[in-house]
Image: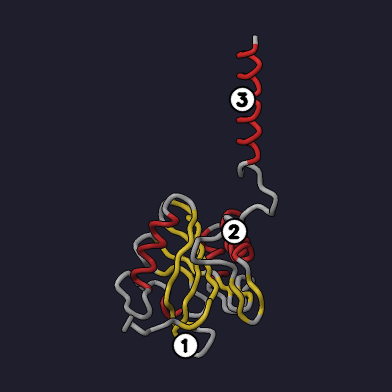
Amino acid sequence: MRSLAISLVVMLALGLALISSGCMQNGPAPDTSAPEDGSSVERGNYTSNETLVAFVESAAAYVRENGKEKALAEFSDLNGSFIQGELYIYAYDFNGTTLAHPVNPEKIGVNRLNETEGDVGIFLRKMNDAVRYGDGFGRIAYINPMRDRVLESKLAYGVQIDETWWLGSGVYTGSVDLDTSG
């Protein structure tokens, strides 16, 4: 009988220790909506990762509601509804061909997988992989067409629309450190 009581007390103590050893969280839940290297971004007007994701998701909804042709025309319109400050929607097929780009319309129809401006080719390969089965984030060093073509770091988010193409947007996060002496 005494060993049963001791066993119950030990099990109770172990249970309490487990519960209080970090299995509970007192603070707010961690933010898992962004990649490890892409915490919320600020420049001029504040744009969070949640805002970026919502913007891209609204563009995906626009495609579902209006069809590919109308959506690509709207995304390519510099005065269209998918330009919000430095946020704009672009679209690519999985071969790397630009389908929509409002601030670089000359790139529409151009395959950019081997492009060397910034790291566009590498970025497109990574984003193709990231969005192939849904959605994903990526980083790119890109010449910001909205700021005098300055090379800047950009956090991008994209979603697959179907098995042939995807769309995305991004937030410029500041200048690119070109120092390679490190």
Disc 1 marks a residue whose amino acid type is Arg
In the rendering, at what x and y percent does residue 139 appear? 45, 69
Labels 1 & 3 near each other (Cβ < 8 A): no
Disc 1 or 3, which lies upstream in sequence?
Answer: 3
Disc 3 marks a residue whose amino acid type is Val
In the rendering, at what x and y percent does residue 61 appear? 60, 56
Q: Which residue is mark 2?
A: 57
Q: Which residue is mark 3?
A: 10
Give the distance between the C-alpha atoms of the residues marked 3 and 2, in whole angstroms. 52 Å
Disc 3 or 2, which lies upstream in sequence?
Answer: 3
Residue 167 in view in this figure: no
- In the picture, measured across the screen, residue 164 lies left or right of residue 171, that is left
Disc 1 or 2, which lies upstream in sequence?
Answer: 2
Label 3: how many residues lie within 10 Å, few (<14), some (14-19) or many (20+)?
few
Q: Which residue is mark 1?
A: 149
In the rendering, at what x and y percent does residue 7 appear? 61, 19
Q: Residue at x 59, y 58 (%)?
A: 57
Q: Residue at x 57, y 62 (%)?
A: 56
